[in-house]
Image (cartoon, helix red, strand yellow):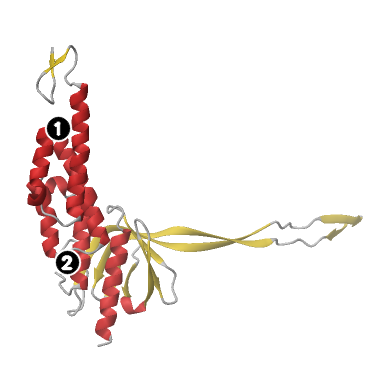
Amino acid sequence: MGICRYCGQRAGWFSDTHDECVRKAAQGLEQLKSCVTDAIVQCKKYDDVKSTIDRLLSDSAIPHDQFLSAFMDAWIQGAETRCIAQPISGTEFTDIGDFYRGAGLTQDEIRKTAGFKATVFSFLIWTVLNDAIEPYTGPVRFNLPANEIPVFGIANVLLSEERTTRSYVGGYSGASIRVANGLYYHLGGMRGHRVENTSLQDIDYGDFLMTTEAVYFSGLEHGNSFKLPYNQVLRFQPYSDAIGICKNGAKEKIFAPQQVANCGWFLFNILQALATKHSALKTH
């Protein structure tokens, strides 16, 4: 006779659950996810909803492993929603971190999630907008002038550009016609019409750094290294997983981090903020 892992009562032969217990726990987990996600989006702290979470766990007899999995999923969703909506301050960053710690999760467990990355990126944007930048000290380093502050660096970034190739289609070379013994007349050919094909070509692979003055890139495979000052940038083009930078009189350069998924919104917003701040400082 099996024992139900939800209620601890007998569950029958060859079974360790009651159908009703499974249904009740599933409903409780959905309510738990909604509670956690809404709390984070609404800027609540863990203590504000702890009693509700404890009641759901008790009433629905949710196993601890299922609770932690559902809580993490809900925290990630709530953190992403809140942090993408607008930049978060240092206090908010701490509160969102305290929320997952209140449930017993650690930073090691949460660090690689999209929610954690969203909180870090959102806070970085806030520091730029509020003149509270803490100089970046990570592994990506460039030799910068004394008055230039490194903001954030990313390794393993693919640099691409659009390249156009031209070809001719529909033409023919002409034919030779025998008009007499040993005498031939060659008909003129036609080159055809020109066709242009544009495709994205990989240029190099290397380190990418944003500072208060410019964007830097150092290619590790083909030596394409350069600086793009903000006052020479026409516009930033956001992509889901990359950022395009259009410079005066040059083709758009597309930077795609290979180990940071879905970072386009962050790169676009922080570069927009840095360029705006740079422009404002130069006009005063």
Label 1: which secondary element: helix
Vertical position of residue 113 compared to residue 119: above or below: above
Residue sitting nearer the eye, 80 or 142: 80
Q: Residue at x 31, y 73 (%)?
A: 227
Q: Amino acid at mark 2?
A: Tyr
In the rendered image, residue 165, in percent from the top left (x then y), is placed at: 55, 61
Binning the other alpha carbons within 10 Å of mark 2 as few (below 14), some (14 to 19) or many (20 upward) gives: some
The residue beneath circle 1 is: 60
- Contact between marks 1 and 2 (CB within 8 A): the answer is no
The image quadrant of residue 174 is bottom right
Quadrant, the C terminus? bottom left
Q: Residue at x 23, y 58 (%)?
A: 83
Binning the other alpha carbons within 10 Å of mark 1 as few (below 14), some (14 to 19) or many (20 upward) gives: some
Q: Amino acid at mark 1?
A: Ser
The residue beneath circle 2 is: 136
* Furthest-bottom residue in this view: 284
The image quadrant of residue 73 is top left
